[in-house]
Image (tube, coloured by chain):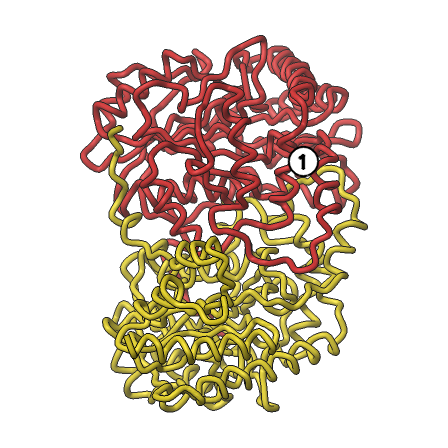
Chain colours: A red, B yellow
Amino acid sequence: MHELSIARRGQEVQASPIRRLVPLANRAKDQGIRVYHLNIGQPDIETPPEYFRAIYDADIKILAYGESGGQPELRAGLVPYYASFGVDVNEQEILITTGGSEAVLFCLLTCCNPGDEVLTLEPFYTNYNSFATMAGISIVPVPGSPADGFRLPPDDLLESLISSRTKAILFSNPGNPTGVVYTRSELERLGRLAVKNGLFILADEVYREFIYDGSVFTSILSIDGLAGHAVICDSISKRFSACGARIGNIVTHNLSVLEAALKFGMARLCPPALEQIGAVAALKVPEAYYARVREEYQLRRDVIYQGILAIPGAQTYLPKGAFYSIAVLPVEDTNDFAAWMLSDFSYEGATVMVAPADGFYATPGAGRNEIRLAYVLNRQDLNKAMLILQKGLCAYNSR
Amino acid sequence: MHELSIARRGQEVQASPIRRLVPLANRAKDQGIRVYHLNIGQPDIETPPEYFRAIYDADIKILAYGESGGQPELRAGLVPYYASFGVDVNEQEILITTGGSEAVLFCLLTCCNPGDEVLTLEPFYTNYNSFATMAGISIVPVPGSPADGFRLPPDDLLESLISSRTKAILFSNPGNPTGVVYTRSELERLGRLAVKNGLFILADEVYREFIYDGSVFTSILSIDGLAGHAVICDSISKRFSACGARIGNIVTHNLSVLEAALKFGMARLCPPALEQIGAVAALKVPEAYYARVREEYQLRRDVIYQGILAIPGAQTYLPKGAFYSIAVLPVEDTNDFAAWMLSDFSYEGATVMVAPADGFYATPGAGRNEIRLAYVLNRQDLNKAMLILQKGLCAYNSR
């Protein structure tokens, strides 16, 4: 059969570095090996039961189109949520999207023309690459370092990367894959840079509930003087352990951004209907829900942190947020190591799947000896996984 | 407050011509006027109860990420469905998308590079414009005519519009907004053109269950010799009256297309989880469900058709599929007329909202005296709506 060739863009868009080793993992499972997944941020915490209850109780008969900007009840329900951490917005400043993914895509489409550049604090959430491909823009990475836990790089480095084509700074806070939590003064520094250079600041804040050791989360929208510049990309996926819902949103005081994003939204008609009903209900969970989840994740974080420190030659830092960490391993290429762990190694009938970190870097060659660990398993499993990782590294380096 | 300016692309993307008069409709409703909606294809038919039942019964505890290409049960469930109308595909040739909208977007991103052109049979589903803006491509309209019910234009016209940048032909069958149902010989003609010129054929077939007067639906994938060229964009929205589900899919024998579309899909992680569970169940409704819906819509089509013929100076044709029709009205600008109907007219406390058809044309000035009518109301309401339309036109032209 003659297959017509697809476009260059279709060939070049990346396969998810978090998901591309899945076939090897499946083969291991087929052989009866248990695979501990540290590669993907799929929490094992239960979604609040209110989410499902609300959908059952709604007893919908016709699953009709909703509003392109999302259901008014959901937009209204988010207003007090944002107020709870110092972000004063009204429901006209909120647009519901199909996941945080669509929020980022719509923001890039709205703020940038094809050929424009976006500064991204590196390492960064790997799917930004695909959204950039879709929007026809270039990602310009701002290199960070595991040595200082990926703090915001100095102004002169940031400024040296800004060109006449730069339109926005895109970053996640708390950071995926780094776990960094930016301080108010770091965000103010980013803000001054954005104002000075006429840039949008796109802050992906989907992990804001996951903050440890009493650290304080600061939203970009709580920084003064950024009303025309700052945009939050958000999602209920992590907050409510509802990754399959595909409900996210954009928040900004810049109504031109929302108006354009809404026009992109009109094209896809509306976000999923039932899932929005669930999201409205989930927003009413008491603060205790977040506190319990936060406590659990902090303990898990400690397991991962101690586990890495126990590996000879590995390096890491204490992440303060999200549920990821970057670890430097004593290997040359973590792609090879991660694949080897799935295809050639097991310990007591089990192995570990990690995400090679180079997929989170745009700088060529960067991150080759790093992995991203997602700590979304219970502590017992995490402890086992870290032991297996240690044993695996030892075996890998003794081949 | 200084608002940073958004990008040209964000300014230029169209507001949905189906939805842009909504504020006027809301104002009319606020004044106590009943508005009959003929502007949007939101069916009033109930979603199969199996859809909701399956979601309730699933009793999910953690709403986790699913597979980026969709849940295996849904992909498998679609195989016998396609076989039922002569399309022989396996589940590896099916990719689940977040609505038919995403199917079209992913196909354009996969098959075209920025700057490429896509031939589109005009008038066409207006949101193709927005997907084209998002993908950075140009729509090249192939003008059709209400005089022949928008049959496929002759080869020489089609061929004269193909350039070195043309990568695909995009069309809906049955047609939205025209209701045209393309014959096998028309599709073969398109197929020969695609093969001769190395083009993809992207067939949006979301209305295939809505076929009247014993007409026969022919899928592009049942045409011989197009395996490497033909792609179906599909959705459960209309078939199961489940527009809010946002579940669609791509079907093609060209695995390079699917592989690239899957990579775009990995970026947005997965389609909505609960809605896929519902879709699996809905696929099992008996053929009688479709037959009953089809019968009802054919009767509605007749109401619209007779209603237009009864309007002095209006012209139309008998549409054979979908639930739309184009009517030529005795006015200069249907945008002005449609707005006037909402803001200045009512008859016995009610008015009608129609979609000005110019938004379904890319040719400048085309369709200015046309409207698109969606016949998704019950017959009693449709009869009233057509009477109001007639009265309104008379009053409008007597101002």
Q: Is residue B48 visible?
A: yes
Position above or below: A16 against B363: above
Amino acid type at circle 1 is Asp
x then y, percent, for residue B378:
61, 74
Q: Is residue A391 visible?
A: no
Residue at x 67% of width, y 23% of height: A286
Taking A220 as reference, is A28 left or right?
right
Taking B325 as reference, is A318 left or right?
right
Query: Could you say whether the residue bearing mark 1 is in a helix, strand or loop?
Result: loop
Taking B148 as reference, is A24 left or right?
right
Q: Quadrant of residue B195?
A: bottom left
* Front-most of residues B121 and A120: B121
x then y, percent, for residue A330:
53, 19
Residue at x 51% of width, y 63% of height: B34
Q: Residue furthest top?
A: A214
Disc 1 is attached to a residue of which chain?
A
Position above or below: B19 against A261: below
Residue at x 36% of width, y 45% of height: A259
* Front-most of residues B259 and B364: B364
* Front-most of residues A19 and A234: A234
* Front-most of residues A107 and A251: A251
Position above or below: A17 against A379: below
Q: Which residue is mark 1?
A: A344
Residue at x 62% of width, y 38% of height: A280
Q: Quadrant of residue B310?
A: bottom left
x then y, percent, for residue A398:
62, 22
Alpha-carbon neighbours of circle 1 within 10 Å: few (<14), some, or many (≥20)? few
Q: Residue furthest front?
A: B348
x then y, percent, for residue B60:
76, 42
